[in-house]
Image (spheres, helix red, strand yellow):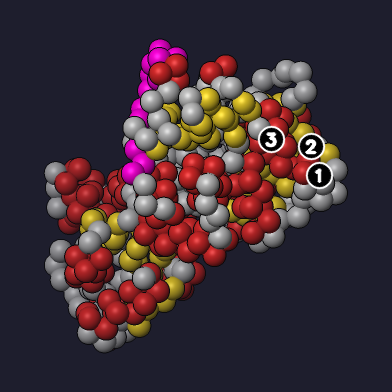
Amino acid sequence: MEYGCIGEKLAHSFSKEIHNALTDYQYELKELAKDEVDVFMTEHNFKAINVTIPYKQTVIPFLDFIADEAKEIGAVNTVVNKAGKLFGYNTDFFGMKSLIERTGIVVENKTVAILGGGGTAKTAEAVSKSLGAKTIYKVSRSSKESFITYDELYNISDTIDVIINTTPVGMYPNIYESAVEIERFKNLSGVVDAVYNPLRSKLVSDALNRNIKAVGGLYMLVAQAAFAVEYFIDIKIEKDKIEDVFNTLFKKKENIVLIGMPSSGKSTVGNILSKKLKREFFDSDLLVAETENMTIPDIFESKGEAYFRNAETEAIFTLSKNNSSVISTGGGAVLNKKNIELLKENGKVFFLDRPLEMLITTSDRPLSSNKSDLEKRYNERYDLYKASADIKIDASGTVEDVINQIMKVTE
């Protein structure tokens, strides 16, 4: 391996895609068990590598030189082999600093709470100091020197201006979890989450829903990779290039989620759209039917609507973990707020707004099998569709017209 990344679990890493977009060398992902790291670093048969969880401190004893920012943080995420000598750097510092500055979150003279105690937490502390934070609290699940507990954090929650989460809480596959309850912090002005998969963690979504500036870790990942490339091959990556790679990757990873009334065209549009964009297509109703081994009408008849809604949420939880997919939802998915929150962690939600007079009734739709029920469902749900959607699509035209509207936004 000439260039690449070492870590314990890399199956869902975005690093290879990012480096391939930034430059033209071959970048590999190499998973190492703890007992394999010593041999790998001793042999150092590489030109340059990134280092990720949990080896950012493990590699330090093998280095001949450590940059000042890496010494201060006590963690290394970039190692360059220069004529057999290993030089260690920490580009996470520059990545997180770039993320905070890009988002416009003000740290200067603010009180910052850093959640977690690993290498990224040390990075967050160093960045907060460099940006002029007034007070920094380090937060851990257990009481230890220089840390406060989460209960102690809640006791001073009104004094906290900025939260930086460096824990893996809310990270794939354990989405829809949050390290803290945002509603308990009455004076927050900013939230930074190092988690980048999902694109918008529950912590970030909860903050955004309260009109607090909040951002996930994908831009940090792209920016730190760009700084690593500069060390790897001694070139300058311009800020515009970082922005382009981030925007392209975000759009590529973001799911396209379709909501709307039964017969509004979600499945038809989703199927064709997925083929055009070369993405996988999923239908939450089909997943429920496959999981239960029953048709939707049979589930309603034998087990009731409440049972179906619970099964629907389980299906949506599963589908929300995907990236780069097209997801069609059942007409009633918007009835449960959690469904939309889940879908938005990795997706942009499109409401296919097809006029009532163009909707049709079919016997396989238990709650809209006749015109009267269809109109009732339409009136009950229309405002929910609008409130749940990121973008409303006029679905009164052809399927091709609807697809073109969506593609203009997503490409």
Residue 196, position as x, y percentages in the image:
49, 46
* Residue 377 visible: no
Residue at 14% from the left image edge and 67% from the top image edge: 363
Q: Which residue is drawn at 67% across and 20% down?
A: 142
156 relative to 21, above or below: above
Question: Is residue 103 found left or right of 238 in the rendered image?
Answer: right
Instruction: Decide: is 42 above or below 397.
Output: above
Q: Quadrant of the C terminus?
A: bottom left
Q: Looking at the image, is 392 positioned above or below residue 330?
A: below
Residue 178 in view (yes/no): yes
**Residue 308 got which mark?**
none
Lower position in the chain sequence, tag 1 or tag 3: 3
**To which residue does mark 1 refer?**
133
Secondary structure at badge 1 equals loop
Q: Looking at the image, which is closer to me, 2 or 19?
A: 2
Q: Nearer the viewer, residue 191 or 22?
A: 22
Q: Which mark is residue 69?
A: 3
Residue at figure coordinates x 19%, y 75% from the top left = 361
| Residue 136 marker | 2
Magenta-colored span? 26-40
Residue 280 vs residue 384, the one in the foreground: 280
Pick the residue in front: 188 or 278: 278
